[in-house]
Image (cartoon, grey):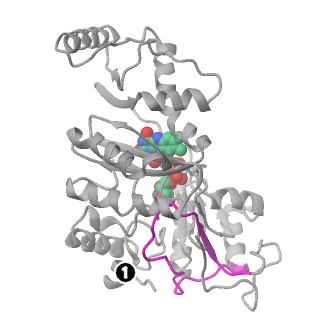
Amino acid sequence: MTMVGDGSWGSGIGIPDSLPRVQGHGYRIHCRNIASMTSKPVRNQSFAMINCDDISYFKKILGERGVVLEEEKLDDANTDWMRKFKGSSKLMLQPRSTQEVSQILDYCNSRRLAVVPQGGNTGLVGGSVPVFDEVLKEAAKLGEMSQLMLGACALFDTVHFMEVFLVLKHLDGLRDPLPSAKHNFYILIETTGSMESHDKEKLESFLLQSMENGLLNDGVLAQDVNQASSFWRIREGIPEALMKAGAVYKYDLSLPPEKMYNLVEEMRERLGTAANVVAYGHLGDGNLHLNISTRQYNDSILSKIEPFVYEWTSEQRGSISAEHGLGLMKANKIHYSKSAETVQLMAAIKKLLDPNGILNPYKVLPTSILSQSGVDEP
Ligand SMILES: Cc1cc2nc3c(=O)[nH]c(=O)nc-3n(C[C@H](O)[C@H](O)[C@H](O)COP(=O)(O)OP(=O)(O)OC[C@H]3O[C@@H](n4cnc5c(N)ncnc54)[C@H](O)[C@@H]3O)c2cc1C
């Protein structure tokens, strides 16, 4: 899907020659057919367009190094990790302190310039890239935060054997760390406590007990950090391997744990041989990552997936967004998991904190709700 908005570059707005231009057309959002966006965003005409004075102001507070206008760098930042969404921002700012961030936002708010904050740009729902010409504010240069974690925590991730094969097939230099007898499901358990020997003891007794109860068929305990990371490499390599395998429709859902895999089976039945349906997730919090892998993006496959996947999740009283957020991809899908009252309340909070709606517009909430609650949208 390529959409051309109604702004246009060039005439009479004082764009300096150094600003890259989109040749021959106006603002555009470029999304591949990855989600049925029932109402496509339209550029909010109340947002200003960048001019020479804006650039001069930003150079004054950030210096030349903090103002990026080069097409190549902007192209990377305009494109999301999955290469599904592409905006057309003409300006990226790189503040180095919270004071600089504050100055930028203050200025953008007074000028009604829309802004998109961007960290590592690894988000999976189109939240980190501009939809039209919003100013990009890179947060990666903002110094590292240190964090102290106390106590113990345990991670329970599940992986199906199909994903193990997928990763080994598509990623180089990996060896299979699992015993030769393969099983349908694998649970990856990691505990982080203050005493390693105590953790090990607990895991061993859990494994033994679960095997005696018939809950588990087999189990392997990593003996050191290297072995542990070879298990995690399989789990963490799944998104990368899926990208290498072709097109991928990704869903990040919360479901009752006992229902998590039913959706995968139903989806396989619906799609037959047209797609490879794989899933993994976090068992502890009922988070399923459903991935539908096809050779290329295709409208007919998409129509079999959506709205079915959202309706199914809603029927189970699950959530259509577990940990990846709603971003642009699911801004119009929020009603599948949240009541009208909740969505109205969210819009009212957004309005309070961001009265001009300049902060990452077109994301998370449907634009129709934002205009009802008084946030100035088209
Ligand atoms: C291979 C792979 C594996 C992943 N695995 C997981 C996983 O296990 N669990 C998980 O939760 N996610 C996972 N993700 C998704 C993603 O990496 C995470 O959500 C991550 O936290 C995004 O961080 P980021 O810095 O790249 O944010 P970005 O993608 O840059 O931004 C994400 C959102 O945050 C906003 N934002 C960024 N910085 C700021 C800021 N300073 N202030 C305000 N808003 C800001 C952006 O505008 C955007 O809406 C994975 C992604 C990939 C590619």
Q: Nearer the viewer, residue 267 or 365?
A: 267
Magenta: predominant secondary structure element? loop
Looking at this view, name the residue that lies furthest to the right.
Answer: 17
Number of other residues with Cα within 10 Å of mark 1, as a class: few under 14, some 14 to 19, many 20 or more: few
Q: Give percent across and percent down for residue 300.
A: 49, 63
**45 part of magenta stretch:** yes
Q: Give percent across and percent down for residue 61.
A: 66, 65
Q: Is residue 17 above or below residue 325?
A: below
Q: Secondary structure at mark 1?
A: helix
Residue denoted by label 1: 368
Image point (23%, 39%), residue name: 257
Q: Quadrant of the N terminus?
A: bottom right
Q: Is residue 173 above or below residue 377?
A: above
Image point (45%, 17%), residue name: 228
Image point (54%, 60%), residue name: 298
Q: Give percent across and percent down for residue 24.
A: 77, 81
Looking at the image, can residue 260 be seen? yes
Q: Is residue 39 above or below residue 149?
A: below
Q: Nearer the viewer, residue 91 or 259?
A: 259
Specify the segment rendered in magenta: 25-53
Number of marks in the image? 1
- Say what amino acid the circle numbered 1 marks: Ser
Q: In the picture, residue 278 is in which quadrant?
A: top left
Image point (43%, 48%), residue name: 272
